[in-house]
Amino acid sequence: MLSRFVSSQLLNTVSKNGKQFSTSAKNKARVAVAGASGGIGQPLSLLLKQSPLVSELSLYDIVHAPGVAADLSHIETKAKVTGYNGNEQMADAFKNVDIVVIPAGVPRKPGMTRDDLFNTNASIVASIVKAVGENSPKAFIAIISNPVNSTVPIAAEVLKKLGVYDPKRLFGVTTLDIVRANTFIAEAKGLDPATTHVPVIGGHSGVTIIPVISQAKPSVSFPQPELDKLTVRIQEAGTEVVKAKAGAGSATLSMAYAGAKFTFSLAKALHGESNVQEISYIESDVVPGVKYFSSPIILGKNGVEKNLGLGTLSDFEKKLLETAIPELQKNIKKGEEFVAKS
Ligand SMILES: NC(=O)c1ccc[n+]([C@@H]2O[C@H](COP(=O)([O-])OP(=O)(O)OC[C@H]3O[C@@H](n4cnc5c(N)ncnc54)[C@H](O)[C@@H]3O)[C@@H](O)[C@H]2O)c1
Ligand SMILES: O=C(O)C[C@H](O)C(=O)O
């Protein structure tokens, strides 16, 4: 009873941007989670297992994946769950899957930047994406592992080396920034967060996170000092959680929610729902000289169908964009060089 209740709640929430989607047997996705035993991986897998959009759930990690899979497999929903542990089972984990979500890697501790995770997470993401490219070259790949600004270019370069890169099918998950912006702006204005939409563009770290409050729906306005504060709060929300967790990691539950929301949009688009809108960090030409950029997109059966671009930015947001550009360029170059050197 409880699982049905939660499942319908989640479906209602995730269909916020689109129409309710009917889920017959053939329009379900086979989804793999890499890093499935972790702080994000476990609740994300739980949310995916509860969804009628998912037919198979392939859980991969270097530890504990069979245990997590056994546990989830007892839930009274149709998705078939299988666990795969360690390098030798990695290829099997990623065979015949439609979508791979990657929250594998280490999280921040207080005092660290996301870029401080690069040395550990770059090779983790590269090895997982290589295995995905070799075993399901058409899969949509959604990267959660930080630093997202660099791990997405790393994934692209790895897939290029394999000759299977399709920029329409590779996504950096920035959904949590939008979820947070919706929540904070709704709180500030006494709105319902479930029907508040605040785009956040750019990248996923500090000044590269650009809240576009001028395009919020419903429309809102703030005196400049309050706008400054809200913007910084959205940019530093990850750090707020890292500090509050005091050494026990970073956002996991809200990220699982955001990751599930994004994955459900991919699943809906894959199976033909029209006008599925998301915001994601993808290969892009909307900002000259910045090869990867997060902006609103329309998803279709083959991935990114249309990049909706930046829309009209306020002067304040244009300044935020100017500040973000050199940092994004640096992060992207670092990711590309990592693969070129390896
Ligand atoms: N994009 C975002 O908005 C966002 C939000 C929150 C966290 N994150 C990032 O997500 C990542 C994971 O965070 P977490 O809190 O779940 O960390 P965690 O340490 O709790 O879990 C990570 C999991 O990855 C697994 N792992 C490590 N190396 C692996 C490999 N080579 N192959 C497969 N699995 C491997 C670990 O065993 C662990 O189970 C971090 O990099 C974090 O910064 C991103
Ligand atoms: O802040 C972090 O390190 C994790 C994640 O990127 C977040 O935004 O919560």
Image: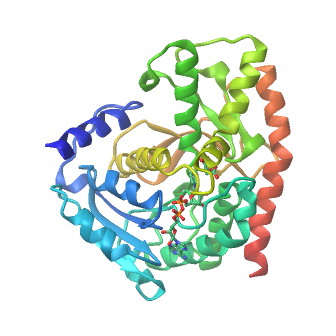
Q: Is residue 313 visible?
A: no
| Residue 136, image quadrant | bottom left
Whole-percent x, y for residue 268 in the image: 35, 46
Whole-percent x, y for residue 284 in the image: 68, 48
Q: Indicate the quadrant containing the C terminus: top left, top right, bottom left or bottom right.
A: bottom right
Q: Residue at x 67, y 47 (%)?
A: 204
- In the displayed structure image, the side of residue 320 where residue 21 appears, left or right: left
Q: Is residue 341 visible?
A: yes
Closer to the camera, 146 or 331? Answer: 146
Residue 183 higher or lower than 88, as above or below: above
Whole-percent x, y for residue 174 in the image: 58, 46
| Residue 286, image quadrant | top right
Q: How many marks?
A: 0
- In the displayed structure image, the side of residue 143 where residue 38 appears, left or right: left
Residue 3 higher or lower than 56, as above or below: above
Q: Residue at x 35, y 72 (%)?
A: 96
Q: Indicate the quadrant containing the N terminus: top left, top right, bottom left or bottom right.
A: top left
Whole-percent x, y for residue 258 in the image: 47, 44
Q: Residue at x 31, y 64 (%)?
A: 57
